[in-house]
Image: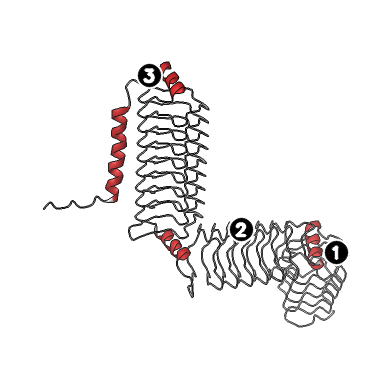
Amino acid sequence: MKKSRPPIPIFCYWSLVIGHWSLFSLIYLPHPVLAARGSDVTKLQETGQCNRCNLQEANLMGAELQGADMSDSNLRLTNLRGAKLDGANLARSRMFQADFSNATLGSANLEQAHLPQAKFNGATLFRANLNQANLEKAELLGANLTSANLEFANLKEANLENADLQDATLPLANLEKANLKNANLKNANLSGANLKQVDLENANLEGANLSSTNLEEAKLFRTNLKETIVNDETIFDSRWQFIWTVVNQPLVNQTLAGSDLSGANLEAMNFTGINFEGANLEGASLFMSNLERANLTGVNLTQSYLHYTDLTSANLVGANLHRADLRHSILLGTDLTRADLSYANFQGANLRNSNLFAANLEQADLGNVNLLGANLGNANLRDIKINEQTSIESQWLFILDLIKQGAENQDLTDANLVEANLSGINLKGARLTNANLQGADLSLANLESALMFGANLQNANLSGANLTGANLGGTNLTGANLEGVDLSQVYLCNAIMPNGIENRCN
């Protein structure tokens, strides 16, 4: 009895297939290669039958060639832009740099075709047979390859950006260093395929078969890995292996504190009450996810995508959301104390009753945002963008106007500026008699010659402020920070000093 031979390892399959393509090129590529024969072009156009023809550099743009037989032919540099090739037979033909842009090749047969650097941009290859085809460095931008057969195909360094490969079969295909940005690979069969160093940014792999697939050094930024099929032989870099687990395994009672989820696609997931404290979610996409009551303390969410995300009652104390996209997100009662929200986009978001105390909102877009009941105490509101549809209380609008216009020599008698962030503002010569500045941030402010008689400055931050010639008679400075302030030329008669002791008049 013959002993059965051991199975060939997957990496050997790739080597054999690549060798086949190389050998195919050597055998079939004529040297030298001649331009198309006029008789062959005429034959093709008249009969649709042109097996083993020389059609090199022929201009067949927009040609009606449905069902035509051009198998084993030479179509190097041939112009087939916009041609109708549905059901055509191009098996084993040499088509180096041929241009099929916007052509239709539904159910066409391109088995073992030689297509390096060919152009299929915008082409339709629905159910096309590309088994063992060589498409190295081919351009397939936006191509429709749904249900196409690409088994054993060589797509090394091919450009498949925005291509549709839903339900395509690519077992043992070579896609090393291919560009699959924004490609749709839903339910595609990639078992045993080589995707080493492939770019799958924003690609959709939902339901794809990745059994024994090599994804070493693959770029999976915001790639949808939901319901993908993997096995023990699937090769992921460790970070993406972890992200795959988060996406596909139950999260009940799971903590993700301190984890690296940067660039992960976590869209439409339920993270209610999950602990993310200190996690790295930079650039992650959480579109339409539920993060209600989640602990996001100190989390890095810079440039993350939180469009329509529910963050109701979530804890984002000290979180970094610099340049985050929070359009139409729900932040009802959310705690954003000391969070960095600079340059964040909140267009249409609901921040009603949220806590933004000491948050940095510099250059944030708050157009059409609901901020009613929100605490903006000590928040940095410099250069924020609001519009007529922004719902915000008059107290904060007044402070915004002061920040924008300045207040030199203005009459602000009895003004309510509690916990206002007025750091660095120019209040030279302003009248602040009996104004309430409790807890306000006046660090580095210019208060030269300001009249602040009877003002409430309890727990205010006046560090580094210029108070030369200011009148602080009768003011309450209990707990105020006066670090770096020169009081030698300040009128402090009957003022209550930071230590709670009244300063007697001389």
Tell me if mark 2 has few (under 14), some (14-19) or many (20+) residues whose alpha carbon lies within 10 angstroms of its own. many
Residue 126, compared with residue 488, is above or below; it is: above
Q: Which residue is mark 3?
A: 34
Task: Identify the secondary structure beneath mark 2.
Answer: loop
Q: Residue at x 43, y 60 (%)?
A: 239
Considering depth in this image, is 379 or 325 the residue closer to the camera?
325
Q: Is residue 433 above or below residue 407?
A: below
Marks 3, 1: nearer the viewer:
3
Give the label on residue 324, or none: 2
Residue pictured at 82% horizontal, 64% vertical: 398
- Give the mark nearer the N terminus: 2 vs 1: 2
Q: Are marks 3 and 1 in contact (CB under 8 Å)?
A: no
Q: Secondary structure at mark 1?
A: loop
Q: Residues within 10 Å of mark 3 (few under 14, many from 20)?
A: few
Report the residue that reaches farthest toward the front. 47
Q: Secondary structure at mark 3?
A: loop
- Residue 186: tell me if it is visible: yes
Q: Amino acid at mark 1?
A: Ala
Q: Amino acid at mark 3?
A: Leu
Say which label, 2 or 3, has the lower sequence index. 3
> How dense is the environment of label 1, judged by Cα within 10 Å: few (below 14), some, or many (20 and up)?
many
Q: CA distance from mark 2 to mark 1?
A: 38 Å
Q: Image check: 308 left or right of 50?
A: right
Marks 2/1 in contact by CB < 8 Å: the verdict is no
The quarter of the displayed image where residue 297 is located: bottom right
Residue lying farthest to the top in this orientation: 38
